[in-house]
Image: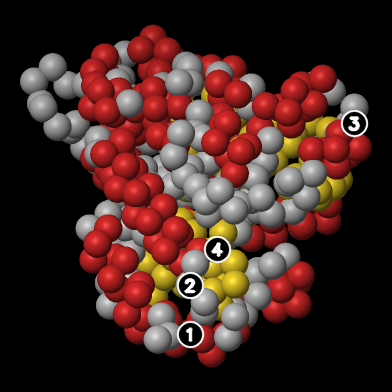
Amino acid sequence: METRAIHADEALADAHAVAAPLYQTSTFKASDALEFAAMASVPMHERFYTRYGNPTRAQAEAVVAALDGAERAMLFASGMAAMTTAILACVRHGERIVAQRQLYPGVGGFLQRAPEWFGIDVAFVDQADTDAFAREIDARTKLVVLESPSNPLLGITDLPAVAALARSHGALTIVDNTLASPINAQPLALGIDLVMYSATKYHGGHSDLIAGAISGSNDLIERIWHASVLLGSALAPFEAWLALRGMRTLPLRMKQHNANAQAVAEFLATHPAIDRVNYPGLPSHPQHDLARAQMTGFGGLLSFRFKGGYAAADAFVGKLRHAARAPSLGGVETLVTHPASMFAAYESEEVLAQRGIDAGLVRLACGIESTRDLLADVEQALPA
Ligand SMILES: Cc1ncc(COP(=O)(O)O)c(C=O)c1O
């Protein structure tokens, strides 16, 4: 993976520039009518019009695809743009989506509106209940929407089992692999059709861009590209350039994210102020064996619940010295949030609490600081 992150785009690279050139241009000129016609008719042509394609974006997309072991990838203006474009490319009025209930609330919110906005039927199931997927996936189902591990409770979906179920009904599967990153999980190798990311997170890695990504087969990415041209959801060149620079160090960064979250999770698991730690790398996680079977590392994000409820959670967040109180994850710096407050724009307090996102829950997105310093910071912020 370290080598792919550096060299996978070589076929598209400039012959002399060591770093990728930034093609900050909206449009490209043809030398004659024939060349113009060729540029206009080739899907994902990278030198026609930047909403269609762009050389900097194509270079970054080559690295995304290589990291996922995919034929092709596409970069979008955000993770939400990636997921919504894929959904609209794969499902029509009168067809059905089966989705797990534990989704990033933006994606869940879009799916909740899909019946009213698009006439698409949506069934939600528990990600841990593979039998529920079997009951809901039927001949009308065109897409199964998954997220593993899920944000912010770190639930795991049995990806090979759900992929096989979907395939037996002719439905496609898409998994949001943001929390794992391609370094910790390879869903395409498990039979999933499309892998989606908020590339804002680990791919970018420095909390300085908003981007999304999808990897899959040539055919599926081309289908999604046709929808993206109409929706205008592709990533702009400068953001693609930043994402490419970020991806060069993704494998290295993930090792430290994984180590930091594992150490903090193990430390909190025995602390008397905490009644539950959600992290798939802990043997106490109810799906630890499944996580180990389909992941090689467990990522930088964990959540945990304070016995003392909101007051204890907020006191902890306020005392941390190395963690900014900010949404998002995947950057080099540690961030901390209170998910029930963060997701209030999408769901009511009652619905969030029913899903386990209650007032005592804290989400820690470990950065790549030294493990020792991070642990010391967490320890000093906890009640004595
Ligand atoms: C798991 C997950 N999926 C999707 C998204 C949406 O991505 P973006 O904010 O890049 O649109 C996020 C953002 O926080 C996320 O955490």
> What amino acid is at disc 3?
Asp
Residue 210 makes an appearance in the image: no
Q: Which residue is mark 2?
A: 271
Q: Residue 343, relative to residue 74: is it above or below?
A: below
Give whichever of discs 4 and 3 has the lower sequence position.
3
Q: Earlier in the sequence, mark 2 or mark 4?
A: 2
Residue indicated by mark 3: 138
Residue 208: quadrant of the picture: bottom left
Q: Mark 4 — residue?
A: 277
Q: Is mark 4 within 8 Å of ligand 1?
A: no
Along the viewing direction, whichever of 216 and 321 lies nearer the viewer: 321
Find residue 314 and name its label: 1
* Position of residue 24 measured from the top left corner of the image (x, y, whole percent): 25, 41
Classify 10 Å Cα crowding around label 3: few (below 14), some (14-19), many (20 and above). Answer: some
- Tags 2 and 1 in contact by the CB under 8 Å rule? no
Residue 266 location (% of width, % of height): 44, 58
Q: Amino acid at mark 2?
A: His
Specify the amino acid type for callout 4. Val
User: Which is nearer the N-term, disc 1 or disc 3?
Assistant: 3
Circle 2 — which element?
loop
Disc 2 from disc 1: Cα separation = 17 Å
Disc 2 and disc 3 in contact, CB within 8 angstroms = no
Give the residue type at disc 1: Asp
Label 4, label 3: how many angstroms apart (C-alpha)? 36 Å
Q: Residue at x 32, y 58 (%)?
A: 367
Which callout, 4 or 3, points to the residue nearer the camera? Answer: 4
Mark 3 C-beta to ligand 1 under 8 Å: no
